Image (cartoon, rainbow, N blue to C red):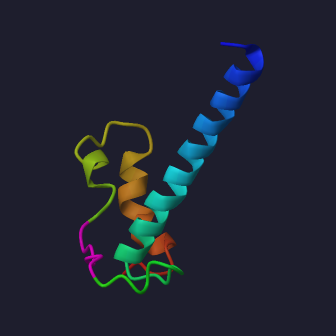
Amino acid sequence: MTPERKEKALLAEINNGRLAMIGIMGLISASKGLIVPGLDSIETIARYSGEYMAPFSGNPEWPGVAEMNTYQLSLLPWGN
């Protein structure tokens, strides 16, 4: 593989990862009831009433987990 081709492939992989992160954040936002252009018209996105950070709440010895669980909802404008 030539260096130019390798650089182009690496850039494509980085951009695909960025797009995937944007997509996941859009789906999470839509499932929490926020307005997301393009996803608002899809009726099959179920509203999620659980806690996204639940996997981290099992071990309060991890750095920042206790604080995150305590203050998480109060810091978010939609949390209550």
Residue at image point 42% right, 55% down? 68
Residue at image point 43% right, 38% down? 63
- Front-lying residue, 28 or 54: 28
Relative to 36, is 68 on the left or the right? left
User: Which residue appears farthest toward the right when viewing the image?
Assistant: 4
The part of the image, by quadrant, that contains residue 47 is bottom left
Q: Which range of residues does the magenta coloring cover?
A: 44-50
Where residue 35 sits: x, y (%)? Answer: 49, 84
- Front-lying residue, 6 or 73: 6
Relative to 56, is 17 on the left or the right? right
- Front-lying residue, 54 or 34: 34
How would you classify the magenta stretch by its main secondary structure? Answer: loop
Is 64 placed above or below 11 here?
below
- Residue 69 lies within the magenta run: no
Residue at image point 48% right, 67% down? 26
Residue at image point 50% right, 79% down? 38
Give the quarter of the figure containing the C terminus: bottom left
